[in-house]
Image (spheres, rainbow, N blue to C red):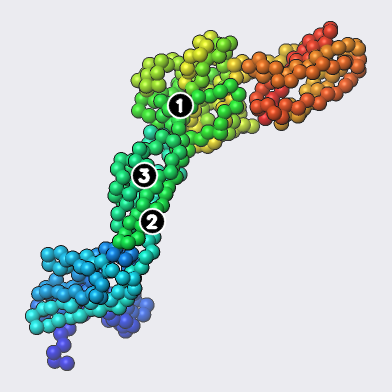
Amino acid sequence: MDSWVDFSEGLPNVIINELEIFYPDFIIRAGTYGRGLWESKLYSAGISPLFAEFSTDKYSVCVEGEVKLINHSTSTTDSIAWFFDADAVTQFSSNKDTAFVRFGQEGDKNITLIAYKNADADTLSRAAYISVNMDLDFSVFSSSGDYFWRGDTTLLYAIGAESYEWYPEIFLSTTNGDQVSAFPNTNTTIYVTGTEGQCSLTDSIKIEVNQNNLVRYALPLDLGENGPYINFGASIELGEPHPPLEDCNSQTDWCDEFGDGLNVLANSVWFTFQGTATGNISIDSRGFDNQIAVYDSPHPDSILVGNYSLLAANDDYNGTEFNYSAAITHISNLQSGKIYWVQVDGSGGNDEGEFYLYLYNNPLDIPEIERPEELNHFNIFPNPSSGDFSISINSIKFENAQIQVYSLQGKIVYSKNINLSGANQELQISLDNNATGLYLVKLSSESWTETRKILIE
């Protein structure tokens, strides 16, 4: 015991359950009962212990695929020597600290490292340390998350192979390497072939491209129902405008949701429509709490530099029943065939969701004409309807009549001649094959004509 040296600094004065030396950091660690894990630097009399240690970058590899082995032996060794199975082809760094190895046959491979210091040597052998096979397992993924918009760039990554070939090249920054930039303008599948030694495998990733985040990629609207659309993950452009923040229910403003004039825009998307022959337009929406603005501008880029006229804007037209979705009730005097721009964002620049837009060439809020009771010759139910509805007719005369149903574009979608019975009668009408939206039902007899609105949902 005379040769023992007291070096207990950092160690507890308690019963030790387990004692282990971690040579790479020259640390001794002690596990205790109820007192945690303790550690201390190893005692050194000026001579570092000699030990051999190494690691690998992969434990499974294809035949002739490269494995990198790294020496972690005592830093003061004089030299090291690596030993591999007979089918190994090797290359080394200048000091042999790194070995690059390719095995020519399948099987579990043994690795041995000997570290030398003066007349001493330490040997570390690991049996069946690396599995060599013909199985290649690699994967590809994108940095764009769940939503990708036209005009964006996403990074694509591949891991698990030695080299990669990407295609089609039209949407890619390069076709080689484990990382490429992709910028598709439509839904696209990107393929990548990974190679390691004698193994080769092709994987793919599908990028679904949402089109209308940028004003220059605005989507055209048709009369009637349009959608569904989303604004998930959309962004705002430099110079993108928004209406004044005043009145939530007007046709010229948006709400100042937070009272500070901030966060007005966050996930806006863009649309266009052509001015109609009537010069009138209205826009309704359904789906989530949004805000809508309509602009007149000569070019999409002009909007971003302030060269535009705000024609209309609304935030909360529809109230709680339809999640405060916005609507533009009427814009008149539009130029037929001219392109106009529609901006939609979540209310307060925060909400995201799926939504529909409804474009009409008549005012959205056409009032029903007040009629004396004796002139109410017919009623419609149910209204709104899924397409099948009934007309209840109250007539005091025997006479001929005609029922016609018009779309807001003036197209006759239903017509039927009937005989009025001089008493209450009921007729069934089906518009199942027509688009959803607002229609006008006109009933004309020899002595009177009346019109009602029906909403098909």
Q: Residues within 10 Å of mark 2 (few under 14, many from 20)?
A: some
Amino acid type indicated by mark 3: Tyr
Task: Say the numbered circle drawn on residue 201.
Answer: 2
Work out whether 256 lies above or below 102: above
Q: Residues within 10 Å of mark 1 (few under 14, many from 20)?
A: some
Q: Depth check: 130 or 340 in front?
A: 130
Q: Quadrant of the C terminus?
A: top right
What SS does tag 2 mark?
Answer: strand
Count of residue discs = 3
Work out whether 149 lies above or below 194: above
Observer able to see residue 289: no
Q: Which residue is mark 3?
A: 167
Left or right placement of residue 334 versus residue 304 in this view: right
Query: Which mark is first along the chain, 3 or 2?
Result: 3
Task: Say the numbered circle drawn on residue 386.
Answer: none
Q: Quadrant of the N terminus?
A: bottom left
Left or right placement of residue 425 versus residue 265 in this view: right
Query: Which mark is first along the chain, 1 or 3?
Result: 3
Real-space CA distance between mark 3 and mark 1, rounded to the nearest whole angstrom: 28 Å
Q: Which residue is mark 1?
A: 218
Tell me what residue is drawn at x 60 percent, y 24 percent. 224
Amino acid type indicated by mark 1: Ala
Real-space CA distance between mark 2 and mark 3, rounded to the nearest whole angstrom: 14 Å
- Mark 1 in CB contact with mark 2 (< 8 angstroms): no
Labels 3, 1: front one? 3
Tell me what residue is drawn at x 66 percent, y 22 percent. 438
Real-space CA distance between mark 1 and mark 2, rounded to the nearest whole angstrom: 39 Å
Tell me what residue is drawn at x 30 percent, y 74 percent. 109
Labels 1, 2: front one? 2
Query: Which mark is first along the chain, 2 or 1?
Result: 2
> Where residue 189 appears, x then y in whole percent?
43, 43
Tell me what residue is drawn at x 34 percent, y 73 percent. 107
